[in-house]
Image: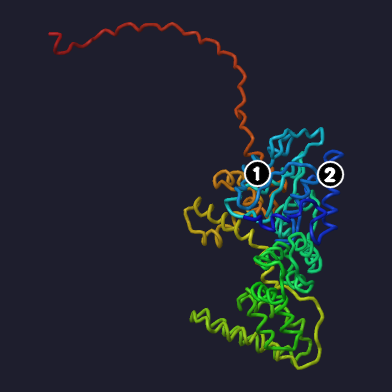
Amino acid sequence: MSEDWTEKYRPKTLKDVVGNPSAANELLAWARSWDRGIPAKRAVVLIGTPGVGKTTSAEALARDMGWGITEMNSSDQRTGDAIRNVALRGAYTNTFDDSGEYLDSKAGGRKLIVLDEADSLFGNQDRGALPAINELIKTTKQPVILIVNDFYALSRKSSTVKSDTIQITFRKPTARAIAAALTVIASKENVTADPAVIMKIATNANGDMRAAVRDLESLSLGTAKIDQESADSISERNAKKDMYAVIDAVFRKNNPSYARTVLSKTDSNPETSILWIDENLPHEYRDPGDLVRGYEKLSRADIFLGRVHRRQYYRFWAYASDMMTMGVATARMSSYVSHDRIRFPMYLSKMSRSKGIRMIKASVCYKLAVLNHTSTKRVEFDILPAVKLLCKNSEEYRLELVREASLEPEELGFLLDRKIDSPAVKDAFKKLSAPKEAAVPKKKAEPEPEPVKEEPVIAEAPVKKTQKNLFDF
C-alpha cells in the first residue's frame, strides 16, 4: 500500500513550509539563539487557525536544529503533574532524544518541548496545568513551543504567557502558494493537471494545505491526468462557504437568490447566522430607509426562530433563512454599497472569551455547594458574592477556604479576580504547601518552689466528760 501523500510530502524543513516565510524565519532565529546559551525568552507561542502549518513547523524546526522532540497534545493527560513529569522533567537539564541518544546541553544538545492546543485547558481533566506551564516558561533549560488557535484565551488567564514568550502568527497560505506546492507534488507523482485545475483545487482548500494534497491524491487515483470535470466534482463536495461570504452576498452582491444559496452552503444554523447579519446591518446600510426595512425583515426572521423554540417545528428555519438573506438583501433601495470590514458578532466573541471563566465559576460553585450542603444555584446567587469579598479581605479565611474546599489556583484566582500567577494566589498555595513548624515555643525552666515547713501539730488534751450517759451505768 502506497504512503499517504500528506505524510509523504509533509515539510521536512522550515524552507518547505508553505505560505509563512516570515513566521518560519522568525522561528528559526529564535532557535539559533539557543546556540549562544539560554535566551531571555525561553518559549515561543505559535498562533493561527487549524491547518496552517504550526505543528508541522515545530517538527521541521527540530529536524533543522538536530533537536529531539517531546510533544503533548489535547489527547494526552495534561494536568499539572503530567506536565511536570513529561515536560519539566526533560526541560531542566540534560535529556535524551527519541532514539535514546544522550544529549548534553553544554555541548549543544537540545530537546524541543511542544505543547499543542495549549489554549484549550479547561475543566478538571487539565487542573493545575497553567501553573505548571508558567513554571516551564520561566525555568526551562530546553526550548519550548506552545501551539494555540486563540492566543487571547490563554494570555488572559496568565500574564506570564504574554510577557515571557515570543508570539509568532501563522496565516492561511494563499491559493497561489498552495497551487505552486501542488504542482511540485503532481510532477513528482507523474500526474498531469492543467494549471487552472490545480488552482481550483487550491482555492477550494481555503488555506488548508493538507486538504489540498488529499484532494489532489483522490483525483489522481487510477489515472495520470486530471481533467476539469474531475476538479468540478470535488469542488461541489468540498466547497463550503463561511459567514464572511454570506455577509458579502447579502449586503454587496445585489442578488437575493445567490445570498440564500450561499447561506445553504455553510455549516452555520439560522440562530448563529442572524447574529452575524444583525451585527453588520447598521454598518452596511447607511440610508435610514434601508436600515428600517432591513431590521423589519430581520425581526420577522427572529419571530420564526422563536416559533421554532416554542413549537419545536424546525421547518420554520427555512422561513427564517429566507427572511434574513433574501428579505434583508431586497431591503436596500439606495445605491450605496459599503466596503468596510465585515464584523464578527460581538455576542459570540464575548461568549467565547468567557467560556473558561464560566467553567471555573461552575467548578467553584460546585465545591462551595458541597462544603455548605446546599445547591449550586444558591451558592451562585447568595453565597458566592460574600465568599469573594471575604477572600479579598481576609488572608486567614482565604487559606482556610483553599484547604477545606480543595481549590485549584485557577479557582482561587477567580475568587480574587486575579490571574493565577499573581502574588496573592502564589503566596496562598506556597504557604499551604510549606511544612508546619512547631508553633509552641519551649518554656523556660521555672525555679523549683521552696519546700513549705510544716508546723508541728499539737495534740489536744482529751476533754473530760462531766455527764455520764446511759451506757456508763
Secondary structure under tag 2 reads loop
Q: Amino acid at mark 2?
A: Ala
Q: Amino acid at mark 1?
A: Ile
Q: Position of residue 214 (x, y in %)?
A: 68, 63
Instruction: Compare residues 442 and 133 and report the one nearer the observer.
Output: 133
**Tag 2: Cα neighbours inside 10 Å, few (<14), some, or many (≥20)?**
few
Q: Is residue 240 above or below residue 129?
A: below
Q: How many marks?
A: 2
In the picture of the structure, the residue carrying the numbered disc 1 is 83
Side of 396 where 147 appears, left or right? right
In the picture of the structure, the residue carrying the numbered disc 2 is 40
Q: Earlier in the sequence, mark 1 or mark 2?
A: 2
Q: Quadrant of the C terminus?
A: top left
Residue 242 in view here: no
> Residue 329 is drawn in which quadrant?
bottom right
> Residue 139 is drawn in which quadrant?
top right
Q: Is residue 293 above or below residue 179?
A: below
**Tag 1: Cα neighbours inside 10 Å, few (<14), some, or many (≥20)?**
many
Instruction: Compare residues 16 and 193 and report the one nearer the observer.
Output: 193
Secondary structure under tag 1 reads helix
Q: Residue at x 75, y 34 (%)?
A: 103
Q: Residue at x 57, y 43 (%)?
A: 403
User: What is the distance, in whole Å, between disc 1 and disc 2 at their CAs?
Assistant: 22 Å
The furthest residue to the left: 473
Residue 367 in view here: yes
